[in-house]
Amino acid sequence: MAADEFDVHIKGGTIVDGTRVPRYRGDVWIKDGRIAQIGGRPTGGARQTIDADGAIVCPGFVDLHTHYDAQIRWDPWCTISGWHGVTSVVLGNCGFGFVPVKPEFRERSMLTMVRTEAIPMDAMKEGLLPHWDWETIPEYLDSLDRAPKGVNCIQYMPTASLMIYVMGLEAAKSREATPVEKKEMQRLLHEGMDAGLCGFSIQRLGPDSVQSDFDGTPMVTDTMTDDDIFVLAEVLRQRDEGFIQITQLTGGLKGDTDDLDFQARLAEVAQRPVLHNVVSASPVDPSIHRRRIAWLEECQRNGQRVFGQGGTIRSGFAFTLENWNLYDSSPAWREATVGSVETRLARMADPELRERIKAETDNASALFSQLQGGVGGPPRKLMVTGVDGRAELEQYVGRTLQDIASDEGRHYIDVMLDLSVATGLQAEFLGTQRSDSGENMAELINASPYTFPGVSDGGAHTKFFNGGAFTTDFLIWLVRDEGRVTLEEAHYRLSALPAHAAGFRDRGVLREGAAADVVVYRLEDLAVDPHWIGDVVHDFPGGEWRRVQRAKGYRSIIVNGVETFADGECTGSTPGRLLRHGRG
C-alpha cells in the first residue's frame, strides 16, 4: 500500500474510548474523516503523525447546552468550548435563536439575545448581521451548512422564535395559540425536522424569569401554555425522532413538583428524550440532588426518557451592573437593570425602588435564593474588585459589600448601588468562591446512569461567565485531583452519553468506522487559565470584549479527522459540519 495510506496516525497513546472499556495503550489511524484502525499493526504510513506518548486519546467532548448561535458566524471554533476539547455543540437552546425570523424582526431578535443571554449587540451587528441570508428554517440550515465551522453542530427549533413568527410578539406573550396557529407551528416544525433540525427547546421560568426579554417582560416560552408545548411534542412522536431541551428551575412556573410532573408528561407525550436543565449538586444539602436523581430514575422506569444535565462548572462571576442580567427573577432588580444606561442610573438612585430591591433581596423567594447561589452567591458577600479608577473609591476595593455596609452603617444594597451609580455602572463585583463539594458533585455523576456534566451556556453571558471550560475543570477536579470519578466514566459522560441522548450518530466514542473527533491530552498538564475568573480580551466584532479561560494540556484536538488545535494553537482549519438529523 502507499506510504500515505492514512491521513493521521496518533501514536503511542493511552486510549479511553468513551464506552467505559478499561484504558489501554494503542495507536489510532484516521482516514477520510473517520477512524480507520485502532490498535494492531498499520497497513501503511500517514501524512501526519501525532505523538501521544504519555497522553490520553479520547473522543471529542459533546456540549449540549450552548448559545453560540451568533458567535459561530465569526468564531468557527466556538471558543471557549473549542479550546477545551469540545468537538460538537448544540445550538438554539432554551427556545432562543434567530430562526424563523422575518426580515423586519431581525434587530428585535438580536435585542432579545442582548438581554436574555447577554450577547453584545455591536458584536452581533458586525459579526452576525452581514451573514443573515435566511428567513425560514430550511434557509437557515442551508446558511449554517455553508458557514465555515471548526466544530460540528446540530440545531434545535428555538420555540420562542417559532411562536413569534407565527403569532406575532405581543400575541405570543399574552395568549395561547389558536388551533390554526398550532397547526402552523406543527407544520413549520415538521418542515424544520425534514431539513435537519434535532428537535425543539424551551425555557420555562414563569413571569418572573431569571432571563427576561429586552424590555423586562418574560420570554415567550416562559409563559406559554402546556398545550402549546404538547402540540410540538406530538410532532416528534409522529416522526419518532428528535429530542427536547427544557430549562425549568425548581420553583419555576408552578412549583417544584408540578414542574417535574410537567416534564415527565412532556417526555410521555413526545416519546422522545427530554434533556432536563439543570441538576445541581448542593454543597450543603445532598438531599436536593438525590431527590432529582430519584426523579430521573422514576421517569426512566415509567418509560419517560429524561436525562439530567449537571451544572458542574466552578467558574466564578465578575460583573458590573452595566451588563448583569441574572437577578431578573426579582421584579425590582429587573426594573432597575432594564433600559438605557441613563435610565438605569436614574432608577438605581430612586429611594423607593431601592427599598423594593432591598426587600426582595433580603426576603428572596426560593427561586431567587437558588439562583443567587448559582451566580456568585448572595449579593451581600460580593467583593468589590474595581471602581473604574476612581481614586476616592479605591478604599472599597478588596472588601465585601457586607463589610463596607457594617463599617458605614448602611445596607449592602445601598453600597452596591451607590458604587454603581458613582462609576456610571462600571463598578465591578466578584462572586464568592463556590464551596462545591467534590463528594456531592461526583455523586451527581456516579449515582445515576442518566446524568452528565454540562450546561456550559457557551457563547452567552460572555462578560462575566466562562462555562465553556467545564470539560477541563471536570477532568482536573473530579478525576485527577480528587479521584472521585474514573477516567473511563468521565469520558463516557463527556462524550458517549450526551451524544446518545441528543441523537448524534457515530460520535462520542472511538471505534473503527466512527467519525474521527478525537482529543489528545496529558491529564497531569491540564489547567484552566486563569483558574477562577477569565481574562478580559477584545476579540469580538464591533470592538466588544469578553472574559476567557484558556486551556492548557491539550496536545491535539481533531474534528472529522482534521486537527483544529495543536498544543493550544488554532490551526485555522474548519472541518466542522452541520449534522442534519445528527448525521454527517
Image: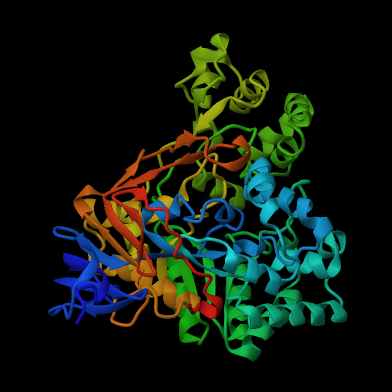
> By what rule are the colours in the image chosen?
rainbow
Q: Position of residue 337 (x, y in %)?
A: 71, 37
Q: Position of residue 196 (x, y in %)?
A: 60, 78
Please identify the residue farthest to the front as the structure is shown: 2
Q: Is residue 282 left or right of residue 246?
A: left
Q: Position of residue 120 (x, y in %)?
A: 64, 42
Above or below, comparing residue 137 to residue 212 in the picture:
below
Task: Looking at the picture, tell me which residue is in the foreground, 581 or 278.
Answer: 581
Above or below, comparing residue 443 to residue 113 in the picture:
below
Is residue 378 something one can see in this rendering?
Answer: yes
Image point (39%, 75%), residue name: 507
Q: Is residue 12 left or right of residue 531?
A: left
Above or below, comparing residue 467 to residue 378 in the picture:
below
Give the image quarter of residue 267. Answer: bottom right
Q: Is residue 527 left or right of residue 238?
A: left
Image point (68%, 62%), residue name: 253
Task: Looking at the picture, tell me which residue is in the foreground, 363 or 203.
Answer: 203
Image quadrant where one finds the N terminus: bottom left
Give the image quarter of residue 173. Answer: bottom right
Q: Position of residue 526 (x, y in %)?
A: 26, 49
Is residue 201 something one can see in this rendering?
Answer: no
Image point (22%, 50%), residue name: 481
Image point (24%, 59%), residue name: 484
